[in-house]
Image: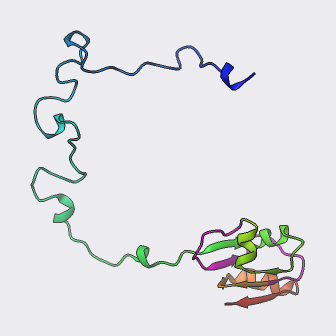
Amino acid sequence: MRLHELKNVPGAVKRRKRVGCGEGNGRGKTCGRGGKGQTARSGGSIRPGFEGGQMPLYRKLPHRGFNNHNFRTEYNVVNLSVLENLSEMSEFDADVFAKNGIAIRKGRPLKVLGNGEITRAVTVKADRFSTSAKKKIEEAGGKVIEL
């Protein structure tokens, strides 16, 4: 079978409803857009939250508190199971992970988490380590270097 031989199942493809093609088809004249006004025009739309000039609800309600979302630190996360799978290496840092397609988000600090087991001595350089990751690496005879 070739790509050009593929066919849809009968009934899978339906023609789109053509609007504005005469009064008889039920979608003539105003074509389902109602009467006159902003929404009847081409390109006419009303932004979300707009209430026709009335003070919108989101401006009436009080905004309180602090949200850390804009200021949070997002990390490139690597688990110990990944270190174990890269068996040919004994030294790990952000560059090594980037070359191997792991933790590739640029500009983010690197954090090593303790998911998985490590059975050999490795040296890991990262910005942060979880407590369990640090413990497992050191128990296996490895070294943890926090940048």
Residues 56 and 46: in front is: 46
Does 113 appear in magenta?
yes
* Residue at screen point 88% across, 87% down: 141
Above/below status of 54 relative to 127: above
- The furthest residue to the top: 24
Taking the image as shown, residue 67 lies to the left or right of residue 89, namely left
* Residue 13, x across and y down, in percent: 50, 20
Judged left or right of residue 30, residue 21 is right
Q: Which part of the image, by quadrant, shows the N terminus?
A: top right
| Magenta stretch, overall SS | loop
Q: Position of residue 96 (x, y in %)?
A: 76, 75
Q: Dividing the picture into quarters, in which one does residue 29 lie?
A: top left
Q: Is residue 61 left or right of residue 108?
A: left
**Which residue is nearer to you in this view: 23 or 62?**
23
Q: Considering only vertical position in the picture, is 50 above or below 109?
A: above
Image quadrant where one finds the C terminus: bottom right
- Magenta segment, which residues? 102-123
Question: Which residue is depicted at the point 65% across and 68% down?
Answer: 104
Q: Quadrant of residue 93?
A: bottom right
> Of residues 29 and 59, which is closer to you in this image?
29
Q: Residue at x 39, y 22 (%)?
A: 16
Image position, residue 53 (x, y; %):
9, 54
Q: Is residue 142 magenta?
A: no
Which residue is situated farthest in the front direction here?
4
Q: Position of residue 115 (x, y in %)?
A: 74, 71
